[in-house]
Image (cartoon, rainbow, N blue to C red):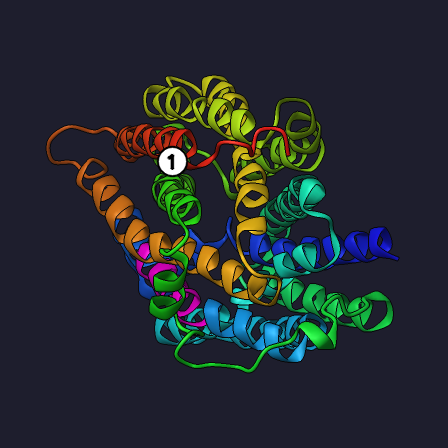
């Protein structure tokens, strides 16, 4: 039953992430259509749209995690997925940029559901096997980005709003599938009272700070995800300006990277953790991120970009390994709280990152001064170097005994 449930959960995560990925290729042209602005201004607005989405995720991820600790994973996960589908349908009809911002605010609240999804793994999988299961969920999400942007880029050629409609339909399919096949993973005996003082990003992070290994890993995750915002925020704009990518090509590059992440997170991470342990897997895989971002920054052609993407998929094994390290350090009735803390840290980087990365891009993307579209990736390389340092120090001090798990 457990294995089947994980497969069903991965399918729901796949559908959820495919819906998000569908709209990525058309956002630049849709923003330009709604505002009449050029690509540099559209990139800035795109960054603020991501900021709005991330701000809501930061605030509500611990709430979603806390609600799932109280009422169970299944109702929370399916309710948020259903409301996300409704929101995509409303964004498909957006008459102006204001509607798009409102839609992204609602999407951010509902998109915090992956805290509940990851908590299902902690509920039902033994600690020594959780890394592989977390990797399977991560691979499922990456697989969603394989199909999502590719399909979004193709159907977006027939209308910038069609991908939003497709995303709404995918969410509906996910809800129906979950109602039919997904079984609750949280035993009623392990549920705890919903506490608003704990179920907020600040209270959650304060509690996690009492566990040295967890707070150290959260610090590394912060720097990792802040660096990754360079790709999430400026990828389409970078490719359009530097290489003349169409929405279809943008979608295919994102789909390729998603395919690589499926292989590393969904297939290789579990095997590497089992063979080398979570500590070594986390530190070695993350070290590949720095050269990857430098290649992207200075790439002279699309094939070199692809080389950087191939190298950049290796760090995908780091996150499941860190989750395996953190999960056993937290009480069983607070796994949703841990996942909410992780989600809040990631969302915090998505609040800070898009304005920062699109701002750097805009400075080097206009006709004044140096034209250097890869500038955000140089900044990302520096942040990743910091993440490697934090992770190595944390695991050297507090990860003893974990390598064999």
Give the prevailing secondary structure in the magenta stretch.
Answer: helix
Q: Is residue 124 above or below residue 257?
A: below
Q: Secondary structure at mark 1?
A: helix
Q: Is residue 135 above or below residue 63?
A: above
Q: Position of residue 376 (x, y in %)?
A: 28, 35
Q: Is residue 54 above or below residue 236?
A: below
Residue range in magenta is 47-60
Inspect the magenta stretch and tell me whether residue 53 lies in it.
yes
**Viewer-nearest residue: 198 or 141:** 198
Q: Position of residue 71 (x, y in %)?
A: 65, 80
Observer able to see residue 262:
yes
Observer able to see residue 86:
no
**Viewer-nearest residue: 318 or 399:** 399
**In-image side of 135 versus 306 (left or right):** right
Q: Position of residue 99 (x, y in %)?
A: 41, 76
| Residue at the spot 32% in from the left edge and 29% down from the top edge | 389
Q: Position of residue 403 (x, y in %)?
A: 57, 29
| Residue at the spot 33% in from the left edge and 34% down from the top edge | 390
| Residue at the spot 31% in from the left edge and 48% down from the top edge | 39
Q: Which residue is mark 1?
A: 394
């Amino acid at each position: 039953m457990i294995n089947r449930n994980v497969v069903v959960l991965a399918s729901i995560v796949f559908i959820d992430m495919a819906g998000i990925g569908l709209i990525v290729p058309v956002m630049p042209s849709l923003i330009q259509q709604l505002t009449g602005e050029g690509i540099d201004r559209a990139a800035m607005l795109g960054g603020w749209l991501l900021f709005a989405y991330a701000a809501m995720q930061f605030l509500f991820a611990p709430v979603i995690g806390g609600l799932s600790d109280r009422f169970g994973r299944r109702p929370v996960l399916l309710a948020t997925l259903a409301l996300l589908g409704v929101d995509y349908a409303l964004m498909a009809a957006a008459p102006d940029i204001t509607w798009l911002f409102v839609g992204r605010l609602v999407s951010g609240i509902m998109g915090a559901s992956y805290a509940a999804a990851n908590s299902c793994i902690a509920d039902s999988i033994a600690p020594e096997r959780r890394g592989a299961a977390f990797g399977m969920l991560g691979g499922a999400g990456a697989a969603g980005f394989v199909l999502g942007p590719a399909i979004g880029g193709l159907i977006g050629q027939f209308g910038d709003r069609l991908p939003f409609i497709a995303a709404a339909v995918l969410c509906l399919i996910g809800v129906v599938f979950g109602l039919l096949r997904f079984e609750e993973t949280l035993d009623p005996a392990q549920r705890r009272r919903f506490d608003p003082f704990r179920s907020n990003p600040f209270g959650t992070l304060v509690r996690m700070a009492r566990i040295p290994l967890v707070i150290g890993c959260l610090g590394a995750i912060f720097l990792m995800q802040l660096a990754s915002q360079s790709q999430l925020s400026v990828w389409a704009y970078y490719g359009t300006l530097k290489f003349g990518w169409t929405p279809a090509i943008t979608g295919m590059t994102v789909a390729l990277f998603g395919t690589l992440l499926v292989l590393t997170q969904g297939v290789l991470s579990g095997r590497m953790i089992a063979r080398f342990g979570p500590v070594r897997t986390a530190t070695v895989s993350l070290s590949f991120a720095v050269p990857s971002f430098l290649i992207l920054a200075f790439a002279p052609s699309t094939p070199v970009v692809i080389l950087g993407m191939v190298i950049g998929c290796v760090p995908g094994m780091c996150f499941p390994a860190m989750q395996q390290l953190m999960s056993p350090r937290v009480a069983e009735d607070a796994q949703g709280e841990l996942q909410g803390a992780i989600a809040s840290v990631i969302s915090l980087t998505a609040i800070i990152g898009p304005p920062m990365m699109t701002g750097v891009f805009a400075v080097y993307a206009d006709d004044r001064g140096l034209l250097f579209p890869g500038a955000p990736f140089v900044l990302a390389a520096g942040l990743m170097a910091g993440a490697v340092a934090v992770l190595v120090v944390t695991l050297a001090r507090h990860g003893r005994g974990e390598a064999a798990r």
